[in-house]
Image (tube, coloured by chain):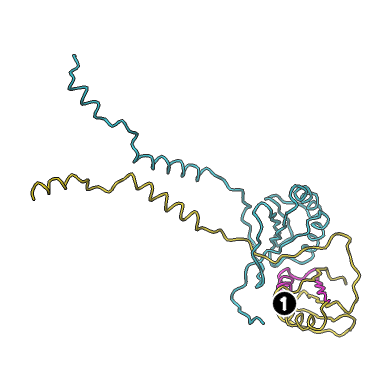
Chain colours: A cyan, B yellow
Amino acid sequence: MSIRSGGLQRKSKASQEIPSSSMADIAFLLLIFFMVSTVFQKDKKREILWPEAEASEKIDEKQKDILNIWMETNGDVYINDLHWEMEEVRAVVRPLFADNQQLVISIRSDQNVPYRHIDLLQKELQGAGALRVVFAAELEQDIIRERR
Amino acid sequence: MAVLGSKKSKVSDEIPSSSMADIAFLLLIFFLVTTTFPKDKGLAIVLPEQQAEQDVSQKNVLHIIINPSGTVTIKRGESQQEQQVRPDDVEAIWRQGFAENENLIAAVKTHPEAAYRFMVDVLDALHSAGAKKISLQLLEE
C-alpha cells in the first residue's frame, strides 16, 4: 500500500486544463436548448386569401409598432388570436394606441370579405384614434405594367 | 535525412478540434447577420379624424364607385355622365384628371356587398398613379 513516487508522477500526467474541445459542445447544447425552448409570440395562421396589389410597399415599422387585425371571410375579427365583435374593436384598440402612439394597424383581411365589414372596421379604428392603417396585400408580380 | 523525417512525424496528423467551434460560430454569426425576415407589405393610408368631414367643391371630386361585380363607375364632379371601366383603368383616369386639376380628390365609394379585393385593386391603381388625396367611403343607396 505504500505509495511510490513513480505512482504519483503517473497520476499528475492527467491534464490540468479544462478540455477546450468540449466547450463547443456545451455552447451548442445551450444554444439548441434556448432555440427549442423559445416561443415567439405569433398570431395563429389563418386561412386567408390575400388581396394583391402592385403598389404595395414594405411597412417600415418595428414589429412592436404593428397591430395585426385579422378578418376572415365571414367578417369575424381577430386581434391577438382572440375573437372580438366589431363593436368591441374600438375598446380593444384604444388602450393599445394609448400605450404606443406609433401604432400602425395592419388590416389583414381575406380578399372576398364584403366591403361593409371593412368600412365598419375603419369606423371603429377612427373611433379609437388609430388613424395609420395599412391594407396588407401581397405584391402582385405576374403582371408587369409599363410605368410612365 | 532519416533523423529529420522522424522529427517531422511528431506534428499531429489530426485536424485540430479546438478550432472547430470557432468555425461553427463564424458560420452561425454569418448566417445570423445575413438573414433578413420578409417584411409585411401593404397599402398604407391615413384615415381622417373622426367627425372631420370637410366640405369640398364638387368639381374637385372624382367619384369612383365600385360595384359588387367588380366593375368601376367613374363620375366626374358635377357632371352626371357615368363611365364604366375596369379597376386597372383608374390609374390612367386619375393621371389625366390630376393633370387637369391639381386639387382633385379621389372619392372611392364601395358597394357594401362588393368584395374587399376590388377596393384594394382600385386603391392599388390610385397608389400607382401617385394619388395622395383618397377618401374611402361606403356607397349609400
Q: Is residue A106 above or below residue B116?
A: above
**The C terminus of chain B - image quarter:** bottom right
* Image point (74%, 76%), residue name: B70
Q: Is residue B17 left or right of residue A29?
A: left
Q: Residue furthest top?
A: A2
Would you say residue B89 sits in the magenta stretch?
A: no
Q: Is residue B56 above or below residue A85?
A: below
Seen from the viewer's position, the closer of residues A73 and B17 is: B17
Where in the figure is residue B77, as x and y percent of width and height?
Answer: 87, 80
Where in the figure is residue B91, as x and y percent of width and height?
Answer: 73, 79
Q: Is residue B95 left or right of residue B31?
A: right
User: Which range is magenta?
Assistant: B103-125
Residue position marked by numbered label 1 in the rendering: B129
Q: Is residue A54 left or right of residue A128?
A: left
Looking at numbered disc 1 in the image, what kind of residue is underneath it?
A: Ala
Residue at mark 1: chain: B
Where in the figure is residue A22, as x and y percent of width and height?
Answer: 35, 39
Seen from the viewer's position, the closer of residues B32 and B114 is: B32
Task: Name the quadrant containing residue A3.
Answer: top left
Would you say residue B119 sits in the magenta stretch?
A: yes
Task: Name the quadrant containing residue B56.
Answer: bottom right
Question: In the structure shown, which secondary structural element does the residue marked by tag 1 occupy?
Answer: loop
Disc 1 residue crowd, few under 14, some 14–19, many 20+, Cα 10 Å: many
* Image point (88%, 79%), residue name: B59
Seen from the viewer's position, the closer of residues B31 and A137 is: B31
Q: Residue furthest left?
A: B2
